[in-house]
Amino acid sequence: MGQAKIQMKKIENTRTRNFSFLKRHQGLFKKARELSILCAADVAIIIYSSSGRVYQYSSSDMTNILTRFNECAVSKQGRVTVHKAEDQMQESNEADVLKQKVDRLKSNTRKLLGKDLTDMGLQELLALDKQLHEGLMCVMKMKEQKLRQQVEQSKTQEQQVMQENEILQRQVQEIQKRVIQPINYVETFAIDYAPETTLNVGPADYQDPDTILLLGPPSSKAE
């Protein structure tokens, strides 16, 4: 059976923790010694146990190794500071360039609006006049293009409305035909089959206060 995998968490049992520390720090020092011998490297290790006891290993003098480390750290910090200052300088220069561009754009805008023209020479005024003329022509062309597009759109909408009106008119005509045909049929049927009404009045009826009114089909006769 393989060795059980150890969980990477604090060992709660003090005795077991001290035994594991002793075993593992000795193994770490052994690996450091092998590294320094095989690779000709200066190695220094400082360990503080949970009880505050210090353990150390160095392939050469510990003080010399720590001095070299501090000098390297200071030098690295200095390089970081220099790089940071250079970055800040570059950002400042870029900000100045952008500010100059913004100022030029604002100045050109004011001149295009007819402001701040006093300090301009004749050639600058002629160039500005040409620029304004070209800009005006571009505006007019774009306006004409937009107007043409609007007219075409209006024509298209008008055609759509006319087509919809034609469709509605055809639908109304079909509905009227469906309604008028039954009405004509009813009127024809009523005319063909309506009974005749006969009013018979004799000479004696003018003398009799009672008047006889006979209604019925043509075949009926008064008795």
Image (tube, rainbow, N blue to C red):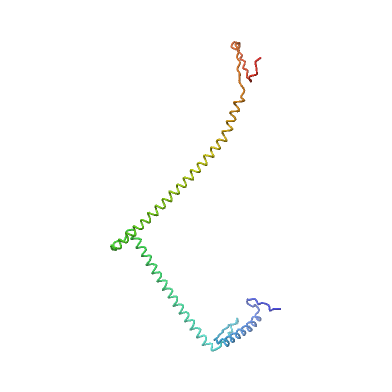
Residue 194 screen position, x and y as percent: 61, 24
Q: Nearer the viewer, residue 98 or 53?
A: 98
Residue 19 screen position, x and y as percent: 65, 83
Numbered disc total = 0
Q: Nearer the viewer, residue 196 or 85?
A: 196
Q: Nearer the viewer, residue 171 or 86?
A: 171
In the shown orientation, is residue 154 left or right of residue 37? left
Residue 109 vertical placement versus 205 (above, below): below
Tell me which corner region of the image, top left, top right, bottom left or bottom right, holds residue 202: top right
Tell me which corner region of the image, top left, top right, bottom left or bottom right, holds residue 220: top right
Farthest residue in the right direction? 1
Q: Nearer the viewer, residue 68 or 47?
A: 68
Farthest residue in the bottom direction? 61
Residue 214 screen position, x and y as percent: 63, 17
Image quarter hosting the C terminus = top right
Tell me which corner region of the image, top left, top right, bottom left or bottom right, holds residue 42: bottom right
In the shown orientation, is residue 36 left or right of residue 146? right
Image quarter hosting the N terminus = bottom right
Residue 143 screen position, x and y as percent: 39, 53
